Every structure is written in C-alpha cells, then in structure tokens.
Amino acid sequence: PEDDENFVVELRDPVGAELGSPSTVEITIFDNDGETVRVPYSVAVGMTNHLPHDIGVGITAGVATFTDPLPELAGRGDRVEIDGFGTVFIESCTDPWSCSVVSGRGRPPADVLDGTVTVIAPAFGSLADAVVGAADPDHLRTFNLAAGNRALDLVCYGGLEDTTPVVIDSWVTSEFHRIRIVAADASYGHDGSWRHRGRWSGSAYRVEVDGTDCISTTVGNLSIEGLQIGCGAGPDVGVAAIRVGESAGKMEISEALIMLDGTSGAAQRAGIAISSSEVLDIDVRNSIFWDLGEPGNEFQAGILVSGPDVSLWAANNTIVGGGYGIHNIDGRVTAINNLVAGSGLSSYAGDFEIDSTLNLGSDDTAPDPPAHAFGPVIVTLSLIHISEPTRPPS
C-alpha cells in the first residue's frame, strides 16, 4: 500500500498537424492495495458553518484534537477547513474534542501543528450535488470506486427538505466498492437523529421532488437506508420515488418511508420501479409505502419489477393503496412477511418464488400457500410460564 501517484502526458511540437484540445492529461495510479477505504461525506440542505468562531486544531496520525469542543451538529462526513492547510473530513469522533479525520480520498492527512479551523460544515448541500461532486478533484477524484479501492458513504442529515432530483449514474462499483446513502441517526455524531422514527417527520432528512422521479439510478451495488422520499406530479406524468434502471450487482433499500401524492392518471407511478436487463439482486425491506394512487389504477404499484434477470427479495414491508402492492411482470420475486392493503386490482400480481411466505393482503393473492386475505382478525394469546430446568451439579 502506498499513496496515489500522478504523472502528466503532454503532446507538443507537432509536425504536419495541429494539436486539438485537450493536449495534456493527468494520469493517476490509484492506491488500490489493501482493504477497501470507506470515504464519508455529509449532506445537509441549508446548513453552512457550524462553528460560532474559529478554533485551534492539531492533527497527529489522522487524529484531530481541538482546542474547543465541537458543536453538537458536527459529525461524520463533515468538512473541516483548516486555514493555510486545506480540508479534511470527519470520520468519527470519540468526544467533542477529538475526531479521526481523513483526506478527500479517505486516507489520514498530513500532521498539523497549531492549525486554525475556520469552517466545519456539510460536505454537500444536497444529495444530488453529492452523487456528482463526490468524484471531483476536491474529493475522490474518480467515479471508479473499484479501481480506486474506495467505498462511498453519503450521510444525510438536517431538517429541511431536499428538493433536487437525484440521478445516480457514471459510477463504477463492485461488491466491495459500494455507495451507501443513509439518513443519519444519533450514532453518526449529529445532534439527535435526522432519521424518521417510523412515521413521516418534517424535522428529519427527506427527499421531496415534484414533477419527476425522486431518485433514479443506473448504478448497482447501492444501499439506500432510512430515507423519507416523497414524490408528486401531474396525472399524466410518470413518477417513482426510486427508479432502478439498467443496473447490475447488488442493491438494498431499507427502513424507507415512501409516499406518492395519491394522484391517479394514465402514467406509471410506483414507490419503487425496477426495470433492468442486467443481473440485479435487490432487497427491499422494513419500508412503508402509501398514497400510491387510486385503488383501481393499473399503472400504479408499490413495488414494480421488470426484467428476467432481476431478483427481488421483499421482506417486512407495508404497502397501502394503488392498483397493485407488489407487481412482478417477469422477474424473480421472493416475498416474506409483507402486508398489502387497499390495492384495488391485486395485492400481489405475477409469479412469486416458492420460498415466499407469511404475506397478507386485502384479497386472496398473497403468495403463501394457502393464500391469506385479512379482514377482522381475532387472536387468542396464551401466556405460559415455563420454569427453567434445574442445572445439574458441576
């Protein structure tokens, strides 16, 4: 393992020709040996400098020690600007006076003696900016996580809605070089939790977009965790909270609250729309979908799957409204422990794998032989005390 190495290739002094532009290119030999380096950047709308005044800092072997305690808002992925030195990013903090910090590429920075911190702030002002800007010269300097031996963490916090559509493309990932987008909870070091607690919260991080998809991706090996996502559009505009296009690899969507605007129309609407001709394994779990549209609309679904090489594992989700709950057109879907209510055409449509079980729906389509439809439910609960067995003599 060693640092990145750079050199420049320059064309000059042509004979019988003229040079086009560019005639110079910088080549980077990436540090891609050893374990994958996780690089964190934070995302928050409307937050600028957390510091009320400049503070002193020293950095030794990647550990920053501050002369004043950091504000409670500071946490993982925030940028720390040091006068005359440059920018580092918070990796983790043991207490308000001491944090591990990394360079823009995730490596320990050079040591600093008696530095002055002028800014501690989110790395990016929106998730849309982050999925593009994380590759720029001030950060990772590449879209190729696999070649750079990097994994990317985008930590989202703040109480203002993020209203810019998020388009994730251009990235090269792998099983070990993933992109993780996560709404921060208290473990990330910020003041309290910026993640919802099972119901929509106007004070937690959320993506709210009108007129187009909230999040769309053609990049596999992606995790989305703990986000609130709300999408709306006119009746003739197709929209999805998360749209997965031609992606390959492994994808996870978990602990999400997904809300459409309830509008019915001729255009497709889905909480999660998956359509790929690539080999894609996608897990959707522990999430809630609602306001999907009118119950009888065939264009509206909680989860829509299309692609013979797409495998969906859906577990512990609650889906309310729309024409379909989970609609499998031609993929491979395993559904476990899902609850679908109020889907006017079919709670579960299409073929489901034989391992599907413990699902409920408001009709008889639940893939759990024999199928279960729920109406009034009576449960008798018996509490039985079982004494612990006598431990034999030792």
Image (cartoon, grey):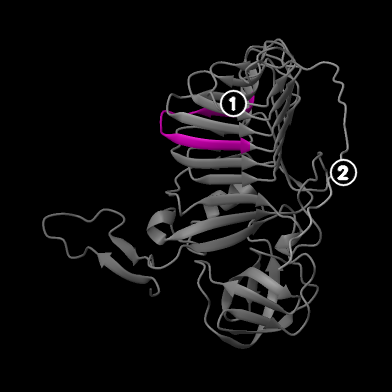
Q: Is residue 266 above or below residue 379?
A: above
Q: Give the Cα separation between the discs numbered 1 and 2.
A: 33 Å
Residue 323 in percent (x, y) is at: 68, 14
Residues at badges 1 and 2 in contact (C-beta under 8 Å)?
no
Q: Residue at x 45, y 33 (%)?
A: 246
Residue 356: which numbered mark, if any? 1
Which residue is nearer to you in this view: 85 or 228? 228
Magenta span contains residue 299:
no
Q: Could you tell me the amino acid type at mark 2?
A: His
Which residue is nearer to you in this view: 297 or 363? 363
Q: Please name the predominant secondary structure of the magenta segment in the image.
A: strand
Which residue is nearer to you in this view: 70 or 271? 271
At mark 2, the secondary structure is loop
The first of marks 1 and 2 along the sequence is 1
At mark 1, the secondary structure is loop
Magenta span contains residue 274:
yes
Mark in the foreground, 1 or 2: 2
Question: In the rendered image, is residue 168 in sight?
Answer: no
Residue 239 in percent (x, y) is at: 63, 26
Crowding at mark 1 (Cα within 10 Å: few <14, some 14-19, many 20+): many
Q: Could you tell me the amino acid type at mark 1?
A: Ser
Residue 385: which numbered mark, if any? 2
Q: Residue at x 74, y 48 (%)?
A: 205
Where does the C terminus fall, quadrant-wise? bottom right
Q: Which residues are magenta?
A: 270-284
Residue 233 in percent (x, y) is at: 69, 25
